Image: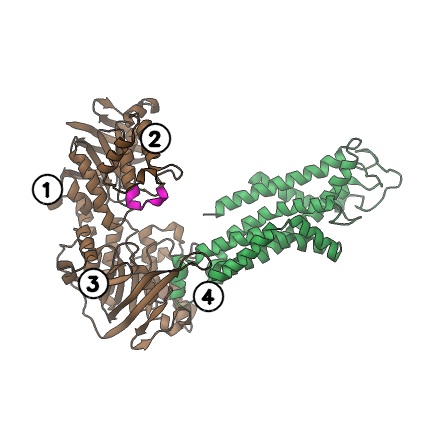
Chain colours: A green, B brown
Amino acid sequence: MRIAGWTIVTVALAALLLPLLLPWNYDQIDWNHVRAAPFTHGHLLGTDSVGRDLLARTLIGTRITLTVAGAAALVALLIGTAWGAIAGWFGGRVDEAMMRVVDALYALPFMFVVILLMVAFGRSIVLVFLGIGAVEWLTMARVVRGQVMALRHRPYVLAAEAAGAPPRAIIVRHILPNVAGIALAYLVLTVPQVVMVESFLSFLGLGVQEPLTSLGILVHDGAEDMDVAPLALLVPGGVLVGLILALTALGERLRDRLAR
Amino acid sequence: MTLYAVERLRVRIGDRSLVEDVSFSVEAGRCTALVGASGSGKSMSCLTPFGLSRGIASGSARLGERELIGLPEVALRPLRARVGFVFQNPLSALTPHLTIGQQLVEAAMQAGGPRLDERALEQLLDQVGLHKPGVLRSYPHRLSGGERQRVLIAAAIAHGPELVIADEPTSALDADLRHAIMEVLARLRDQGMGLLLVSHDLPLVERYADRIVVLEAGHVAEAGEAGALLAHPASGAARALIAASPRLDDPKPVLPSTGGPLLEARDISVAFRATGWRGGQVAAVTGASLAIAKGEALAIVGASGSGKSTLARAIGRIGPCDGGTVSWRGESLPVRHGMRREHRAGMQAVFQDPVASLDPQWRMVDSVAEPLRYLMPELPSIDRTARALAALEAVELGAAFAERRPAELSGGQAQRVAIARALVAAPDLLILDEATSALDVLVAGRILDLLERLQRERRLAILLITHDIAVARRLCHRIAVMEAGRIVEEGPSLQVIATPQSAAAKALISASR
């Protein structure tokens, strides 16, 4: 857990701060050194096929990937918690209807839905994370619903009702604080999933648009030149794998600790 | 003939000593019982010599001629096969994907016994009094708790052991099942097996044990023949255990006098919707009526599943109620979601599971003060805290508990906090829903003492839900007996106990004798 935590913090800080120290901008073209080898001409990882510094692009790509993933996970958290809490609290037919909606959305090929959204509303980064968040909330909704259902029949909730607490007060004071831990754990678990989806969309050319970049685009571009410049694939790919593993490990540990 | 003899046994885990200098023995055809409060080391004393606990044993424990202490696991295994073990929780001790017949065959073979055929299996089930047709081919989830415990006893004796060790075999079961299970074990004893029984329930043990060993904090407090020990307990531990559980032949309780009418419930009925979109209804309570006067205590007793909790919650307006009316001081109460502050102020509830009754994230002082926040919103927060502290004081918990959270409390302490919370806004009626059943006997006894004192001092009316008619007798003026969702009998406590009319009342009373 500690290793996973530090990996995430290090990668995030590097993506945030290191670009300030580099002499190259992510979209700046070094006309004299197109496809430069690593460690030449001041390019630590070399340059890509149009002469942009690969290190600068990897850092910016990580930043974009993390931002999109974080924002999408937050959207998932908001929709999922609200949906799950309402279904779990009211129960009965409300719950049945709301959860059948979730089941139906689960059954949709969700990559297809995201692609449709992209096609219908154009390619913007806001839409990327709204679209991803809109499908990633399903698991969150199920988890929160289960938790709320379990909590609402706890004796302390009954005691609060007997003490005259209105439903709003019970939800705000007793239910949500006790759901927060598990929701947080699943939030951390949602982030690596979103990282994957975003990278995949970008790999297909549907995500972030040039000259802006993300880890998925870098892996895509790197894969084209992997026989001559393996680092262009291995570095962004390594960052991607490391991030996903670290986030998953952290999320699972949190979940096991908080799921009593 | 002595089957199993333990002498000067010590058990330690790490550098903590859990059992010191404990000696007892089990004879063939006799029952020795180890009794004590939880944490007194009774399970440890039983299981550690067989390598079944984390503890390290020293001293001596002889099974027949063989010394168990100091043997490696490989050598212990064949010796364990000469013993049958019955554990506490019958719900989780059976493998869900094997039929009862398969489990019994497997249990016998693993313990080194013969491969049992159908006839032998049926004989085995007959021995434990399980006469349900087709039970050998059913899966564990089709059986009730009592039936599963019978299967576990059958599994324990399938290989023909000479000694049976039963560790709290009835604690997870309802009162009315406890005696049935004990009868099964007593019959095995009569067939010549030695029985080593571990329990915290002294009244239960009294009927079946030949010798009793009372343990306290890892030491033997007292040991002797069962009848003599119970008649003249010499040690404080034995006296405390005897006094803790109320009995039907206790002296007549002195109850506070009662006043005018307080609450009247008429024709209460509750039905639960079966699962699914259009499943039918399951009636939980049908046409139940009852009345409570000021300062009066009324008990609703019944076996589990008889609807007593559902009825109490319907009356207290903290659970569903589909029909009937409740009037409070002559005024009709609205339904659950229409209850306003002034309606709620008069009655409060305490539930069975003490730890789940408290929000795990809240400090105790906040939990106790919670009713004041809603019932007396005009009270400044400093007065709220002061009243909460006073309520904690009233349940004999000091100010030191104010800052703690539920995980830092024992079950008894948590139940005291729940009682403090129920009393903080000075209600007229307290609903006690099995408030002592989840607690250890000694702790439950002290909670009953506390409730008795509060009842006397505050002239509280009480609606007590319990399956233990002796508890009802101690606190309540009147008893209502429920069976299958209906009140089948009602009357003054002593009269109902002396001359029960319904089968349900008779069963509950015989379970408490």
Decide: few, some or many residues near mark 4? Use Cα within 10 Å; few <14, some 14-19, many ≥20: some
- Across and down, in percent, residue B48 comes to 30, 32
What mark, if any, has residue A255 been given in the picture? none
Q: Return the chain for callout 2.
A: B
From the image, tell me which residue sits under label 2.
B106
- What secondary structure is found at the residue carrying circle 2? helix
Mark nearer the viewer, 2 or 4: 2
Indicate whether B86 appears above or below A172.
above
- Judge from the rendering whether residue B437 lies leftward or rightward of residue A158; answer left or right: left
Earlier in the chain: of badge 2 and badge 1, it is 2
Query: Label 2 vs label 1: CA separation?
Result: 42 Å
From the image, tell me which residue sits under label 3.
B489
- Residue B292 inside the magenta-drawn segment: no
- What secondary structure is found at the residue carrying circle 4? helix
From the image, tell me which residue sits under label 1.
B228
On the same chain: label 3 and label 4?
A: no
- Residue B146 inside the magenta-drawn segment: yes
Q: Identify the amino acid type marked 3.
A: Glu
Decide: few, some or many residues near mark 1? Use Cα within 10 Å; few <14, some 14-19, many ≥20: few
Earlier in the chain: of badge 3 and badge 1, it is 1
- Magenta stretch bounds: B140-148
Q: Are marks 4 and 1 in contact (CB under 8 Å)?
A: no
